[in-house]
Amino acid sequence: MFLPRRALVDEILESEGLDGIVFSHPPNLRFLTGFSGSTGCLLVTSSGVGFLTDSRYTTQARDQMVDVEVREAKILHKSVVEWLTELGCRRVGFEEETLSCSEMRRLREATADIVWVPLERSLQMLRCRKDKEEIATLEHAATIAEAAFTEVLPRLRPGTIERDFATDLEFAIRRNGGEEKSFDFIVASGPRGALPHGIAADRVMQEGDLVTIDFGVRYAGYHHDETVTVALGEVSDTLRSIHDIVLRAHDLAIDAVRPGARIPDVDAVARDYIAQCDYGDFFGHGLGHGLGLEVHEWPSLSARTDATLQEGMVITIEPGIYLPDVGGVRIEDMILVTASGARVLTKIDKQFRRLPV
Ligand code: ZN
Ligand code: ZN
């Protein structure tokens, strides 16, 4: 599993003309080695692979990485530079987006003999096409999400406090085998639904509300992300109508997903439909994002992302309409880009759902 992933790094070494790359961003460490600790440096070089960590993690690292030499470091940046020098590395790439300025300064101060090359796009793309194990893990997380959501759905009713529902959902996720929540849940009812990032608060849900629940399950390090919007009893014609528009925009965008599709074009499918329905001013965020070992990964699905979809990417499609002082709707699924188009990995039905009150 890890050798094909490291072969992707070999391709970057070649295309960037590098002798090695230093990785320290935990999701990259986990992707390339299986190491799930929070501190360490992986050196992938043309002459071998090595891992450095401190005494808290050496035993764990040796257990989790059977095929990588693990050394214990007292002063990490010094040991990194010594090992790179030992391997004859002169041009070395680093994770531009996540390595801190002070970490970079310490590496530079430790030697003048290495040229440090910032890597942005090539590393962003490293994890974007998911392999079989990753897809199965994300789909399993979606199955846990469905079981947990189904379990707590009866508690979604007038009188329930948003924050209490979020807590119940989190407990249900853990009871059903999830290791953690992917992020702080959004539970936004009634007028609060107009807040795209309305973290669950003290509002008491009322009959006639739409309630937007954006939640995620972390399982084996992977992040599921899904949004359901449901009605508590009868809702106004406006709310019903924006639900139908968002659902249609979501379905049209999924139909447009296929390898080779330009990301701005897929974004435009949903955005243009919402604009045609006269709600263009009320859908301000991007259409979705990649996800996996992080809840937001490259690519971001927006008009500004100049890239195409590729087979194996897992992305979200999550259009929304947010009407200030009235309410809002967002509908989000995780989608696998397949050879022939798209497969929805999330399991919860997104058709309009009116809960009994
Ligand atoms: Zn979400
Ligand atoms: Zn999302």
Image (cartoon, rainbow, N blue to C red):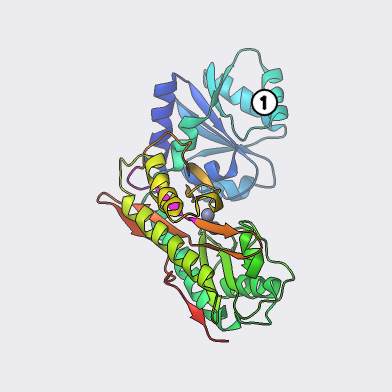
Q: Is residue 174 above or below residue 318?
A: below
Q: Quadrant of residue 41?
A: top right
Q: Which of the pair 219/167 is nearer the observer?
A: 167
Q: Residues within 10 Å of mark 1 (few under 14, many from 20)?
A: some
Q: Is residue 294 visible?
A: no
Q: Where does label 1 land, which residue?
A: 104
Determine the residue positioned at 47% across, 76% down: 353
Residue 5 sits inside the magenta stretch: no
Q: Is residue 219 above or below residue 281?
A: below
Determine the residue positioned at 47% across, 20% down: 18
Q: Which stretch did the figure color magenta?
A: 310-319
Q: Is residue 79 above or below residue 69?
A: above
Q: Is residue 157 left or right of residue 203?
A: left
Residue furthest right as drawn = 202
Give residue 282's position: percent from left, percent from top.
55, 53
Could you tell me which secondary element the residue under label 1 belongs to? Answer: helix
Q: Which of the pair 296/73 is nearer the observer?
A: 296
Q: Quadrant of residue 197?
A: bottom right
The C terminus - image quarter: bottom right
Residue 312 sits inside the magenta stretch: yes
Determine the residue positioned at 42% across, 28% down: 12
Q: Is residue 248 left or right of residue 86?
A: left
Main SS class of the magenta portion in the image? loop
Report the number of numbered marks: 1
Give residue 92's position: percent from left, percent from top.
54, 22
Q: Is residue 225 above or below residue 268?
A: below
The amino acid on which the numbered mark 1 sits, given as a three-letter code, is Met
Residue furthest top as drawn = 113
